[in-house]
Image: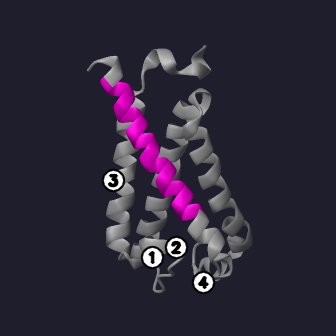
Amino acid sequence: MREKKRTIIVEVISALFILLFVYAALSKMQEFEQFQVELSKSPVLNAYSKYIAIFIPGIELLIAISLITNRFQFLALYASFTLMVMFSAYVVVILKFSSYIPCSCGGILENMTWIQHLIFNMGFVILSIIAILLYPYKSKSYLQ
């Protein structure tokens, strides 16, 4: 695949992650109290809900900003992959092992079922893998 096409695909995927993470972070921050309450009801996260309620939107915004900058974009794609795998693993754990299924997502994502949410997350995991694999090698600034 030509370098220009690879770059365009990576930029489109990065833009999708930027939209997702900024939207998700702002939704959580806008309804911060409810987000924290729902996290505290989680059988997996309740002990750390206060810290996680701050950490998740913060890391989402940090990754979004890093995706914008050429110097950190490649590492931010790995961070995007990692975060989406973690979110997906959380959904699986909740679905398999919890009698109570909290809703700690904001905006349009809270209208999804947990299965739809898992499929959505896995779609973004796949997109991150594609972007990492197609990332133009000579542009990986951390290697320079």
**Cα–Cα span, label 3 and label 1:** 17 Å
> Up-down: is 144 above or below 108?
above
Q: Which residue is mark 4?
A: 41
Q: Looking at this view, is 25 or 50 the one in front?
A: 25
**Mark seen at residue 123:** 3
Start-end of magenta stretch: 5-25
Disc 3 element: helix
Report if the CB atoms under discs 3 and 4 are less than 8 Å apart.
no
Disc 4 element: helix
For marks 3 and 1 on the same chain, the one whose residue lies earlier in the sequence: 1
Q: Residue at image x 59%, y 81%?
A: 38
Position of residue 100 measured from the top left corner of the image (x, y, whole percent): 48, 86
Report if the CB atoms under discs 2 and 4 are less than 8 Å apart.
no
Report if the CB atoms under discs 3 and 1 are less than 8 Å apart.
no
Crowd rating for badge 3 (residues with CA inside 10 Å; few <14, some 14–19, many 20+): few
**Cα–Cα span, label 4 and label 1:** 16 Å
Disc 2 element: loop
Q: Which residue is mark 1?
A: 110
